[in-house]
Amino acid sequence: MSTDAGPGAGGADPGELAELADPGELAGLAGLAEAVARAAGDLVRDQRPDDLGVAATKSSATDVVTAMDTAAEELVRRELARARPDDGLLGEEGGLRPGRSGLTWVVDPIDGTVNYLYRIPAYAVSLAVVSGDPHPARWTALAGCVHNPATGETWTAARGAGARLDGRLLGPVLAPPLERALVGTGFGYTASRRAEQAAVVAALLPRVRDVRRIGSSALDLCAVASGRLDAYYERGLNPWDLAAGALVVTEAGGAVTGLRGAPADERMLVAAAPGLADALGAELAALGA
C-alpha cells in the first residue's frame, strides 16, 4: 500500500474520490470526529464508576466489554445521528447501521478496555469516517480522531491534509534499520492465538531494538506517527481498531500494509516508515506471522 494512497484507497473510484477531496468538507468531518471523540472521552473518564464491572465478554473470558464501552458508543451514535443522519455507523459494541450517504463512521468507544478497567492511562476513543465498503481492505479513510481521555492527547487526520497531535503537524515518520527499531505489538484474547503470537515475538525480539505492548492499537498507531514507536504490527485487528490510527500514520507519511503486498486487515497490519514497513513485513512473513 503506498503512503500517499492512505489505507484502503482502492475502495472508491476516481470520480467518487474527486467529490470527496474538498478540503473544507474533509476539515469539517475531522472536526466532527474530534468533537464527538472528546465528548465520549469525557464520559468514560469523568463518569467511570469505582465499582466498574464487566458487562459481557466477546472472543473469550478475558476479552471484556464494560458498561462504559456501551454508554460511550451510544453517545457517539446519538451525536453522529444528529449531525449526519444519512451516514452509516460501524461500532465495536453495536455492529453496523447502514447509511444512505456512502460514508460510514467506524468507532471504538474504548480502545484498550483492559487498561481502562485497571486504571492504566493508555486507552482511547477512536473514531473515523470512511467511504465505500466499511472493510479496511476496501474503504477510503477520509478523516479521524484518536483521543486519550486520561492524558488529553488528541490525534487528528484528514485525507491529504496531514496528521496532527494537539494541533501540531506530525511527520515525516522515520525509518531506522530493523535492528534498531522499537516495535510495538499486541495479542489476541484466545489461548491458541496468544501462543502463536508469543512464538513470533520470541523469534523477532533478538532482531529488533526492543518490543513494547501498550494495550491499545489506536495509541500504538498514533505512537508510530508521533515517533514514539518506530513500527507496530498486530494480527487480528478489527476495523474499529485501526480505522482512525491507520489514517493518522499514513497522513504523517508512514505506510500501513499487510503481508506480501496485501492491504492491512484482520490478517495482519504493519505500520512504519515505508522502508521499515517493508523490512518488518518481510521478517514477519518469514516467521509465519
Image (cartoon, rainbow, N blue to C red):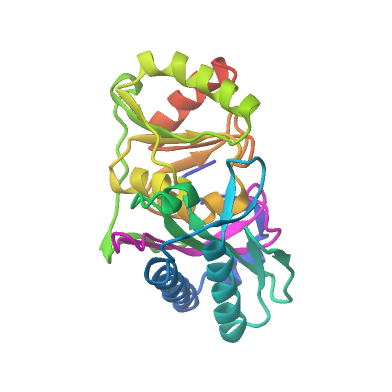
Work out whether residue 149 or residue 205 is closer to the camera in this orientation and state it. Answer: 149
How far across and how far down the image is residue 256, in percent?
49, 42
In the image, taking residue 124 as reference, residue 5 lies left or right, namely right
Q: Can I make out residue 95 in this image?
A: yes
Rendering quarter of residue 93:
bottom right
Residue 153: say if magenta.
yes
Left or right: 78 in relation to 208:
right
Left or right? Give the position of 154 relative to 87.
left
Find residue 190 and report its horizontal and vertical position in percent: 63, 33
For the N terminus, which image quadrant? Answer: top right
The magenta stretch spans residue 275: no
> In the picture, which quadrant includes the C terminus?
top right
The mark tally for this picture is 0
Coordinates of residue 49 in the picture (x, y in percent) = 44, 66
Image quarter for residue 194? top right
Residue pushed farthest bottom? 82
Which residue is depicted at the point 48% across and 34% down? Answer: 233
* Position above or below: 242 against 26: above
Q: Is residue 4 visible?
A: no
Query: Which stretch appears magenta?
Result: 129-157
Q: Which of 269/46 is in front?
A: 46
- Residue 98 on image: x %, y %: 74, 69
Q: Residue furthest front?
A: 51
Decide: is 154 above or below 198: below
